[in-house]
């Protein structure tokens, strides 16, 4: 006997229903695929393209070595009033055409500050091919007499050329040792910074041998003043108040001792002569 499988014939309406369901399912799958492509594939492709561009840019930068293509073409110098630009450039030891990455700014700064006439130097790169040098020159602070004539010392404590316009307007320092020179620099720098008018009146400065205190003569008074080494400006202020008071004791004194914090000791002329 032969077996036959019986398959039920679908009616017209039932076939339409099946086809409608299949069509709806296919549309939903196509819509989901389109959504995935639109929301996920495009950003992924864009990110991949961006990574590729960045990689190519880095590779190209390294290949071209652009940093070595930027070389020094201009040097700007400012703040020099005594030193010539040629002297500054010779001390800096930089040449046009040097790669900008090869410039050692700290080394250039140190070389410039070793000059006697340079108190402070600032060196920086200025994009793309310029080096900017800014100087604060040392200023004349006092004179020292020597067998060969006058010597001028700066606020840096270094010798500087004697300017024709200086005359004898600077204080004269009596010193025979490096320690006394350093003491005079310390005192007069503080005096000039804290009381420029009082500094302008200073005529003679004589540090003691140990450098612990200094006697100062001013042009507008007949007495001398003793200042300590560690004065922070208060002693200058107290002394100015004493001068402004014009007291009788002050007028008859030949020594005003400002070395002791918070007080001033006036020594009459007779005492000064007896101590002589």
Image (cartoon, helix red, strand yellow):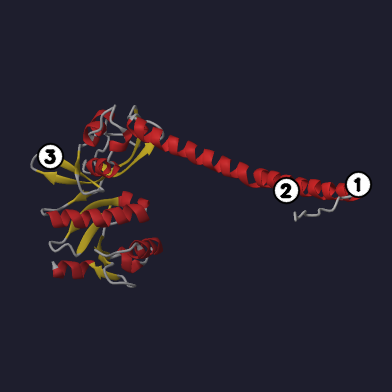
User: Is residue 258 positioned above or below 169 on the image?
Assistant: below
Marks 1 and 3: in contact by CB < 8 Å?
Answer: no
Image coords of residue 193 (percent x, y): 35, 53
- Rendering quarter of residue 112: top left
The mark closer to the camera, 3 or 1, is 1
Alpha-carbon span between mark 3 and mark 1: 130 Å
User: What percent of the width, then of the height, locates residue 40?
Assistant: 63, 47
Residue tagged 1:
12
Neighbor class of circle 2 (other Cα within 10 Å; few <14, some 14-19, many 20+) is few
Residue 77 in sight from this viewpoint:
no
Q: Which mark is residue 29?
A: 2
- Name the one closer to the observer, 8 or 14: 8
- Identify residue for label 3: 149
Looking at the image, is 53 positioned above or below residue 182?
A: above
Distance from the alpha carbon under mark 2 to that under mark 3: 105 Å
Q: Is residue 96 above or below residue 175?
A: above
Closer to us: 51 or 210:
51
In this view, 230 is above or below 1 = below
Label 3 secondary element: strand
Relative to the observer, which residue lies in front, 36 or 48?
A: 36
195 left or right, relative to 8: left
Left or right: residue 88 versus residue 40 is left
Give the image quarter of residue 75. top left
């Amino acid at each position: 006997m032969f077996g036959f499988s019986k398959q039920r014939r679908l009616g017209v309406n039932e076939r339409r229903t099946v086809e409608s369901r299949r069509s709806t399912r296919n549309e939903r799958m196509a819509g989901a695929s389109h959504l995935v492509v639109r929301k996920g594939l495009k950003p992924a492709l864009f990110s991949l393209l961006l990574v590729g561009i960045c990689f190519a840019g880095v590779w190209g930068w390294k290949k071209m070595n652009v940093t070595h293509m930027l070389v020094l073409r201009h040097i700007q110098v400012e703040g020099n009033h005594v030193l010539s630009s040629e002297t500054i450039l010779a001390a800096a030891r930089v040449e046009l055409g040097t790669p900008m990455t090869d410039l050692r700014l700290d080394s250039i700064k140190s070389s410039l500050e070793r000059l006697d006439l340079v108190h402070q130097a600032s060196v920086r790169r200025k994009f793309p091919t310029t080096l900017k040098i800014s100087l604060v020159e040392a200023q004349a602070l006092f004179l020292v007499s020597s067998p060969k004539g006058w010597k001028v010392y700066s606020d840096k404590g270094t010798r500087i050329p004697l300017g024709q316009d200086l005359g004898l307007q600077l204080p004269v320092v009596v010193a025979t040792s490096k320690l006394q020179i350093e003491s005079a620099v310390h005192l007069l720098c503080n005096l000039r910074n804290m009381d420029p008018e009082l500094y302008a009146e200073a005529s003679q400065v004589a540090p003691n041998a140990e450098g612990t205190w200094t006697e100062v003569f001013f042009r507008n008074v007949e007495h001398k003043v003793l200042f300590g080494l560690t004065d922070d400006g208060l002693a200058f202020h107290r002394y100015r108040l004493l001068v402004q008071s014009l007291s009788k004791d002050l007028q008859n004194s030949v020594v005003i001792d400002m070395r002791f914090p918070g007080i001033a000791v006036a020594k009459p002329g007779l005492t000064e002569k007896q101590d002589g």
